[in-house]
Image (spheres, rainbow, N blue to C red):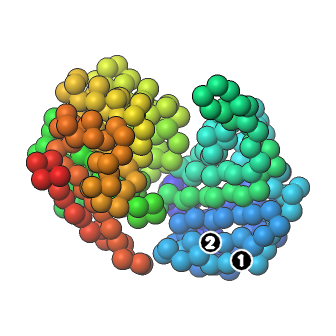
Amino acid sequence: MLHTQRIAEATGGMPLILKRWLPEQICFALSRVGGEWEELHLRVGRSCSVTVAGENRRVDIALSREEMDALVVRLCDGSLYAHRESINRGYIAPGDGIRVGVCGRAFVERQEGGTELLGVRNVDSLCFRFPRPLRSVGAPILPRLRAEFPRGALIYAPPGVGKTTLLRSLAQQLAGGVQAIRTAVVDSRCELNDGAFPESALLSFLSGYPKGDGIEIAARSMSAQVILCDEIGNEEEAQAVLGAANCGVPVIATAHAASVGQLLSRPGFDTLHRAAVFGVYVGISRRAGEREYRYDVTAWEDA
């Protein structure tokens, strides 16, 4: 069965893949929620909710502590130890491009200059984010992005607009077709490589790598002609993007921001701007329930 069918086919609107992990009674309650699911939030002792087209739909069923603990173990394929580092960073990646956000009681150790997160216990909430079926978006801006090479592009929007969906589609279009180029995707949270890409695509995935390390390896060891990376945000990652640019490899990245001004006011991004690493800044938006993207393209010279 095709990947998109495994994810999208449902009883009601519920992705069938959830039956692998969730108790039967939870699945029954959730199966009544229709539409194309974007997120599922499960909580201990509080109502669950499903996000469809940006709308939160409450489901009047709550997980017990025992059900939540068992669910977390199943998501980790029986080994919490193997997933401890990603849990400490706030997520579990069980496969098929699904990312599950994790929050609970954190245990920290105070150190000089800050604190270190040692672990998370008593998980209280999980947020399932589902990959949308791979579809062709980004075609209106793709020629502009190619024209900027060897400079890259930075795509920005508030959370939930669809930056990851756009990045996945751009990866397919850049790595496929008659003008295919070697494309490396730094997938640190294991949510971009969901098995939906055609076998002919010239794609290499660096899954689970820290973003800075993944970008450096893609540029220096994988001979990538373009690097895609989701949600860069700190100075270390910005320095890795700068290093790739100095190697002549364009980076197409995404970041959380509502405007170019807000983006460039953050540490690290002003450094990348002064170095002209990104030829364009692309803001994306969509109206509620709308599938097509709106693009606001700002040239480096005008930012």
Q: Residue at x 80, y 44 (%)?
A: 121
Could you tell me which residue is drawn at 68 percent across and 35 percent down? 117
Which of the two labelled residues, at mark 2 and mark 1, occupies the earlier sequence position? 2
| 232 with respect to 99 (left or right) | left
Query: Which residue sits at x=24%, y=64%?
Result: 295
Circle 1: residue type: Val
- Is residue 267 visible in the rendered structure shown here? yes
Q: Describe the element under mark 1 as helix, strand or loop.
A: strand
Task: Name the residue furthest right.
Answer: 66
Residue 209 picture location, percent across and down: 50, 31
Separation (CA) of disc 2 from disc 1? 7 Å
- Labelled pair 2, 1 in contact (Cβ < 8 Å): yes
Residue 228 seen in render = no
Which of these two is toward me, 260 or 279? Answer: 260
In the drawing, does residue 229 fall left or right of residue 189? left
Instruction: Name the foreground residue: 178 vs 144.
Output: 144
Q: Quadrant of residue 267?
A: top left
On residue 59, which mark appears? Answer: 1
Q: Is residue 104 left or right of residue 52?
A: right
Name the residue that disc number 2 marks: 50
Image vertical order of residue 126 relative to residue 206, above or below: below
Task: Assess disc 1: are there few (<14), some (14-19) or many (≥20) residues with their C-alpha within 10 Å of its C-alpha.
Answer: some
Q: Secondary structure at mark 2?
A: strand
Query: Which image quadrant: the N terminus?
Result: bottom right
Q: Quadrant of residue 272?
A: top left
101 is higher (above) or lower (below) than 277: below
* Rendered location of residue 98, percent (x, y): 57, 52
